Amino acid sequence: KIKEINEEHEGKLQSTVDSYSGIMSKLRESMQNSRAEGETTVNQRIAEKEEEMEVLHSTVEELSDLIARLQGDLSVAERRYLEAEEESDHYRVEIEKKEAEIEKLSLEQLATVNMLEDRLDRSELEREELLKERSDELRDMRRKLSLLKNDLKAASESENRLLSELQRS
């Protein structure tokens, strides 16, 4: 009976082992399939990431080139700005000099105009004084002429009287 039980247990055990072996085979196959699918998925993701990395690397290189160009442009712009600022300072100094010259000339011209106005005023006063003197001289001469005319008339009358008296005598 033990032998029968033993054989029966062996049969069940063998059946369990066979079942277990089948399950293990299916499990291994499933694991291999999952592993193969996982590797494929991982490889695809790696390939996608490598493509993304290449695109990113290309983009980074383009951005680096762009940054370098922009830095160059910025340097040129800064240099031009400094040159323009220096030129502006130069022109500002020149304008200030010209303004000072204009102000100096304006002051000189104003002084000249004032001097000429003073001279004109003095000349007008001198002319008025001279006209007054000439007018006074002319009045004196007219008076003297009138006196001379009167003297001449009186002399002429005296002469005529004398001539008449001479003729009478």
Image (tube, rainbow, N blue to C red):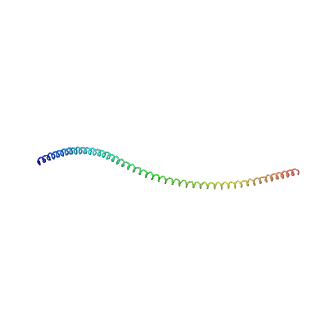
Q: How many marks?
A: 0
Q: Quadrant of residue 115?
A: bottom right
Which residue in the rendered view is the most extreme toward the front? Answer: 1
Residue 76 in percent (x, y) is at 40, 50
In the drawing, does residue 145 fall left or right of residue 19?
Answer: right
In the drawing, does residue 18 fall left or right of residue 135?
Answer: left
Residue 38 in percent (x, y) is at 25, 45
Which residue in the rendered view is the most extreme toward the right? Answer: 168
In the drawing, does residue 22 fall left or right of residue 106?
Answer: left
Residue 30 in percent (x, y) is at 22, 44
Q: Quadrant of residue 116?
A: bottom right
In the drawing, does residue 20 fall left or right of residue 85?
Answer: left
The residue nearer to you, when weighing 89 against 94, is 89
The residue nearer to you, when weighing 130 against 15, is 15
Residue 35 in percent (x, y) is at 23, 45
The residue nearer to you, when weighing 106 against 86, is 86
